[in-house]
Amino acid sequence: MTTDPVAPSRQRAFPVVQATLDNGLPVVVSQDRAAPIVAVSVWYRVGSADEEPHRTGLAHLFEHLMFEGSAQVAAGEHFQQIHQAGGFNNATTSFDRTKYYQCVPVEYLDLVLWLEADRMGGLLEALTQESLDKQRGIVKNERRQRYETTPYGDSWERLYRGLYPDGHPYHHLPIGSMKDLDAASLTDVHAFFERHYAPNNAVVAIAGDVDPDAAIERAAHWFGGIPPNDELPPPPRASAVSPTPVGPPEVVEGAVPEDAIFAGFALPPSTDACMPPLEVGFNVLSSGRGSAFHRHVIRPELAGQSAASLERGQVGSLGGFVVLGKDGGSADAGWQAMTDEVARLATDGPTTDEVERAQAQWRRGWLERVADAHSRADELAACASLYGDPQHTFVRYEEQMRVTPGAVRDAFAAALHGREPTVVRYLPENSGASVGADANADADAAAAPGTGR
Amino acid sequence: MKAALRARPAVGAPPTWAFPTFVRGRLGNGMDTVLCHLPGREVVHLRMVLPAGVGVEDMARAGVAATTAAALYEGTGERSADDLAMALEQFGAGSSAGAHWRGMQISASVPAFDLGPVLALLTELVAEPAFRQDELERLQRLRLEQIAIQQFQPQYRSGKAFSAAAFPSWSRLAVPGDGTAATVTATMPDDIRAHWAQAACPARVTVIVAGDLSTVGAGADVDTILDTTLGTWRTNVSPRQDDTVEPCPLSGRSMAVVDFPGAVQTNLQLGAVTGKPILEDRVALSVAAHYLGGFVGSRLSTRIREQLAASYGASASVEYRLDNTVLRMQSSVETDATAAAAAVMDQEVAALREGDIDVDTMRDAIDNLARASAMRFAQPSAVAAEIEGLVVEGLPDDYHEQRHRQLLELTPERVAEAFRRHSVPAGLCGAAAGAAASIAGPLAKLGFDLSVERGV
């Protein structure tokens, strides 16, 4: 085991200690004495981007199976033990990673580490067809609830599908398709575990009322006996598959309240140097009442809703835009106003006040995140997992604070200006507008973003 | 190579924990203060609790309190709405306002070192709200647009129908807290100004500040900052008490079906309304709701999610609306399993009333609530929100100590007793937003008196 204490000069708001166990498992610990609690996040570098063809949704289904028991833990016992301790826990799956987290009174640290180690090393001993079938049913209901019964619920699924071609790691969302969920077998699940779940493909982050050296020693105690996987698959790469050339908007007529445009730009990976100024720029556009969209789209009543988001990913990022019409009217006016704001950032750049506002909001968010044990563990695991360095959280802070209006302008000009987005447009059924007629309107709208007219 | 896994560890004794101490005070203008110092929490959270909440609204103007709260951000005598937003957000403040049953509320999170200037801006916001005619009319249109969008959301429609089923039609509690299209349409700008006049009384306001109060500004302490900001707010309004609101429990077995033709799931909400609980029952009821639907291993989750495999999850809660206790269970279930899920809710409530309890699950529920506080109240926003709850509900300052003691002594039998007092023997009422053609028949067979309304 090697220990790499962080140099004092890099310790900004809080201390971080990291070590790598002999089996390749990185352990990151940050002490916070403010409350007698401890949070543990375990991130695996596997997500829906790693799924095989016709097995979409397997990474997320697998995440559910991680609560169905392991060598020494009964089905459902992981939740039960954490709950009885007064804690909370859960897991989520994204394109690039699957994370498992819990926060408990500090006396339960060993219990949490044991639970996590037992399923990291012994999951397959407990997996059964019955548990697979049960969790398959639950996941299908998750899909029905989140994607199939909510207005615009399938918008991002459609957008990613339009943005990235079949075969691209981000072509499908982590929820997967009903057909592929039905097809997942116990053999698939076993193979997935053996391929991706190993200490040298994970990160354990611990934050809270603990002594860092002791916490690392406890992690080594519980996880140290789990062998590494010497044949880890390489991470998914986008280079082989480019984003789909932008085509005509996908028009969806259905039970939605308003005409709506969901638009997306394929952007560089999260590690690209353009990301900090892009992130500031997206916050200038869409974060808070002082944002450009609130002032220039919502307040003038050009749209019912208007938002922009930057979804950062390891293979590529998505610049997303959403606008809803209002009072049964077209979304075009709002879309045009949003386009104008994007063009302004790409040509004139934001004002200094706009950038300082966005940075102040980001800084508060960061301070709140790192003051919370669960969020701090999550932040450190994210940085260790996605950037290879838990200290990257401090780098991100500095990068955000250094961004200038000119840097935002240059990033927007390079990444968005003059480009067409991929568009999904929703039309309310029985709205009186024919799909064909609105498809023409869509084409106009789709030409607008980023062009600067 | 097989993993060498270690045996299960022994677990230490349950931790001791106490709710953070707070100090009450009063400013020169009569405003109450509650300060809670949380070392190391650099982002301070503050909450102003004002009178004139949803509970005092005229039924015909339902939603006026929420609109009034939102209107506070639409500019002051000195600043436009844009200028006000920009000023607050440049200090890093995240601020919002809203209304609950017993009052209005303004909250903000801000880095401690900028607490002073943000409090100065919030003082301007409450002391000189512009309430411009055009802005108030715009807010009305915005709210109507939001309501139109909500009509397409099964969970919102089900919740709205649940309130209409659970409370008599004359009750303010029968319609959503932020109003309906009809009541929002009927609310004129002068109604908003008049509503604010009921709330703008510093002597009836409490401000709560939680976070690291040792770093709030060079040479200044939080008392001085409050004195020189909110303490300067003066109005001519005399303190008065809110109107008394009667409890209005309604027993019955009605079910409002909101029709979403072809929906693959139903949002099902079932519950009951009873009167205000005594303090001891309040703790027991929180355990009862947790036992029913507060966690993955709860009764509803186990039976509907795990055994029926008909849902992604199920929940239960106890909510206090004025002097009413509202028990509500909820789940989005597969269409074909709607009646089966409703039957499970019926059965679990009946079993708890009768004391037929799953002791292991009940013990988990009690243990969790007794031990969860250290996690729940680790952040300033959660601490401030909890203190706000004490203020608006009139609970004692040592409520958490009392609650913790009661939790440690609570037995399943005691929970069942309290639940019997706060559930309705005639059964549950509720709402189901889903495909009426598929769910109405099976629900009627469970003995519900059905009504059907159009969803989309």
Image (tube, coloured by chain):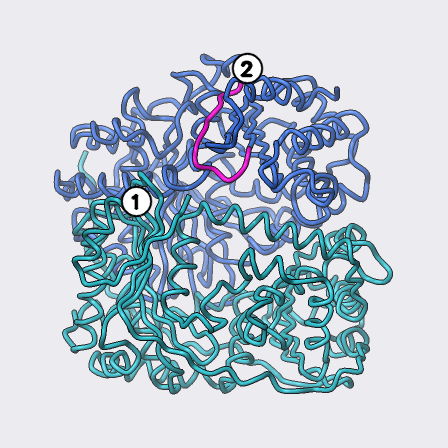
Position of residue A39 relative to residue B10, above or below, is above
* Badge 2: residue crowd in 10 Å (few <14, some 14–19, many ≥20): some
Q: Can I make out residue A104 in this image?
A: yes
Q: Residue at x 63, y 23 (%)?
A: A445
Count of numbered badges drawn on the protein: 2
Q: Nearer the viewer, residue A150 or B14?
A: A150
Q: Is residue B42 magenta?
A: no
Residue at the spot of label 2: A246
Question: Which residue lies under the disc numbered 1?
Answer: B435
- Quadrant (top left/top right/bottom left/bottom right) for the C terminus of chain A: top right
Tell me whether marks 2 and 1 sit on the same chain: no
Quarter of the figure that contains the N terminus of chain A = top left
- Identify the secondary structure beneath mark 1: loop
Front-most of A282 and B371?
Answer: A282
Amino acid type indicated by mark 1: Ala
Which chain is tinted blue?
A
Using the rendered view, name the quadrant where residue A211 is placed: bottom left
